Image: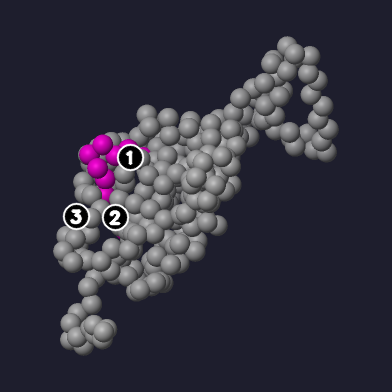
Amino acid sequence: MLARLRHPLRPRPNRVTVLRLQGVISGTAGRGALNHAALAPLLERAFRKGKPNAVALSINSPGGSPVQSSLIGAHIRRLSEELSVPVHAFVEDVAASGGYWIAAAADDIWVDESSITGSIGVISASFGFQELIARYGVERRVHTAGEDKSMLDPFRAERAEDVERLKDLQAKIHVQFIDHVKARRGTRLVTDRDLFTGEIFLGRDAIDTGLADGVAHLVPKLQELYGEKVKLTHLGQKRPLLQRLVPGLLASAEQALVERVAWARFGL
């Protein structure tokens, strides 16, 4: 049977690569975690394979590591500019904090009426166990060279100077986040209110403030932009076999708790 040959004058259908980004953004390789090391090969493939007309990011992330968010967002921008490939972000349940950092790397951001975006701030959360271990007669032994080496040790009482240093670090990261959003969203952002308090925005509110461009779902919007016959190629991270067979088997209880808390902040 002869292979079907493409007519030399028949135009190639438009192609869009859809990259799904779901999960907490973390520097460690946990279940469903997003990090630059794991995503870099997928990003390269998304932008280069098949010479796509565009790349669409399907985002569902409550955020996480600011460094990983920055690395992923910067990689997206480098490839987009190097290859002249536009990027469209589609928010599912949530693209907040680091999730919004990545979304802002796109040329436009589309949301559902109930999507949650924003949370442009920096958060640090931990626990204090010093009274618990004292109650059970546990002695904490820590020896350091450098008085600040054990800053914010959860097994000792919180020190005011440690909190001050942490807030200084957070403020600097916050400025970087704000600069990124302003650079990417430009004049689309409203100027009559502070968008960078860590507040979250729902669907239409995000559009009204300029954090998003409109209400749209991935497939119909891409068909509107690239034609009804646009060819979509879907990519996403693959979990290891054991994680697929027994979800969470290889994830630590601590990491699972952190991920649960990250989603719970947005009622998810």
Q: Secondary structure at mark 1?
A: strand
Identify residue type, mark 3: Pro
Give the residue drawn at x 69%, y 16%: 132
168 is higher (above) or lower (below) than 26: above
Residue at left offset 23%, top offset 55%: 219
Q: Earlier in the sequence, mark 2 or mark 1?
A: 1
Disc 2 residue type (three-letter): Asp
Chain-order first, disc 2 or disc 3: 2
Residue 182's spot in the image, x, y percent? 37, 50
Is residue 167 at least partly visible in the picture? no
Image quadrant assignment for residue 79 = bottom left
Position of the C terminus, as image quadrant, is top left
Can residue 50 be seen from the camera position used here?
Answer: yes
Q: In the image, what residue occupies the spot 35% across and 55% down?
A: 57
Magenta run includes residue 114: yes
Position above or below: 235 against 126: below
Q: Where residue 246 sits in the image (x, y, percent)?
A: 51, 41
Amino acid under disc 1: Asp
Q: What range is drawn magenta here?
A: 104-118
Seen in the image, is 254 located left or right of residue 72? right
The one nearer the camera, 157 or 56, is 56
Residue with the mark numbered 2: 108
Residue most toward the top? 135
| Contact flag, marks 2 and 3 (Cβ < 8 Å) | no
Element on which disc 3 rests: helix
Which numbered disc, 2 or 3, marks the residue closer to the eye?
3
Helix or strand or loop: what does disc 2 sit on? strand
Q: Which residue is mark 3?
A: 220
* Depth order, front residue of 30/77: 30
Residue 93 tag number: 1
